[in-house]
Image (tube, rainbow, N blue to C red):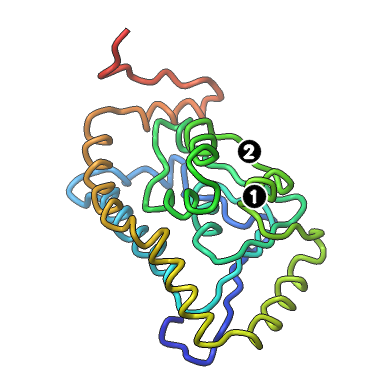
Amino acid sequence: MRADTETRVIVLTGAGDSFCAGVDISTEGRRDFYLPPQQNERLYQEGGQDIIWGLQSLPQVTVAAVNGPAIGWGTGLATSCDFRFVSENAFFRIPEIGFGMYYDVGCLYGLLSLVGPAQARRLTMLGDDIDAQEAKRIGLADRIVNSADLGSAADQWARDMADRVTDAVRVAKRLVYASTVGRNRHIASLEIELMSCYYGSNTDRYEGLAARKEGRLPVFSREGRTR
């Protein structure tokens, strides 16, 4: 898309009833994820960051038509777009903290630039569900649309916007990117190293996923804590 000089606006949406359900946390999906020597987690982190930065820095205007739940990565994809049209039945959730994980692959910075530190803490440290109305209130959604009309509303907006996209709009987008999420890219490179140290020092992610599967509360490790 970056090389496509004809396309001016991109609409990102989900198939079916969900915008994006996030990464696969099933037993089958995670079976070989952390096994050496592939170092799949690190490859996932590096590749994931490339996707997020690539989406955020596209020259085209981007709009996420959030047609249903946006979980984890789904929230990250939505916040990487310039605008968000949200179905009245959609919601955002960043559940990683409950699995002994954290919100990674560079997704935090887009969220932070939209809602600020206080709400970013709420979403990433508490894992609260944020419905459409709350998302609009805190700046996570630009417009709430009836579920049946979301696709047509986003499409019409994109067509109207395409007529207004000029070089000035592209410059404005680049400046906003450079002054918000773009300036945190060097921090994101350290995030990969922090992730490697964190996941290498405890097994909380295994406990979190097992607890989810077994329908119980997780019992996480207490390394490094003081009373």
Residue 188, image x, y percentages: 30, 52
Q: Which label's residue is closer to the chain start, 2 or 1?
A: 1
Q: Is residue 11 left or right of residue 118?
A: right
Tally of numbered discs: 2
> How many residues crowd around disc 1 within 10 Å: few (fewer than 14), some, or many (20 or more)?
many
Q: Quadrant of residue 226?
A: top left
Q: Residue at 43% of width from left, 48% of height from top? A: 108
Whether 163 is drawn above or below 36: the answer is below
User: Which amino acid is tagged 2?
Assistant: Asp
Whether 37 is drawn above or below 215: the answer is below
Q: In this view, does 128 lie to the left or right of 177?
A: right
> How many residues crowd around disc 2 within 10 Å: few (fewer than 14), some, or many (20 or more)?
some
Disc assigned to residue 69: 1
Q: What element carries label 2?
A: loop
Residue 98, image x, y percentages: 48, 30
Please tell me which residue lies in front, 122 or 196: 122
Residue 55 in view, yes or no: no
Residue 141 in view, yes or no: yes
Image quadrant holding the C terminus, namely top left
Residue 96, image x, y percentages: 46, 38
Please tell me which residue lies in front, 222 or 32: 222
Disc assigned to residue 147: none
Q: What element carries label 1?
A: loop
Q: In which quarter of the image is residue 7?
A: bottom right
* Identity of the residue furthest to the top in this view: 227
Disc assigned to residue 129: 2
Q: Is residue 15 left or right of residue 119?
A: right
Q: Residue at 81% of width from left, 66% of height from top? A: 149
- Using the numbered discs, state the Cα–Cα distance from disc 2 to disc 1 in whole angstroms: 10 Å
Q: Residue at 33% of width from left, 55% of height from top? A: 184
User: Which amino acid is tagged 1?
Assistant: Pro
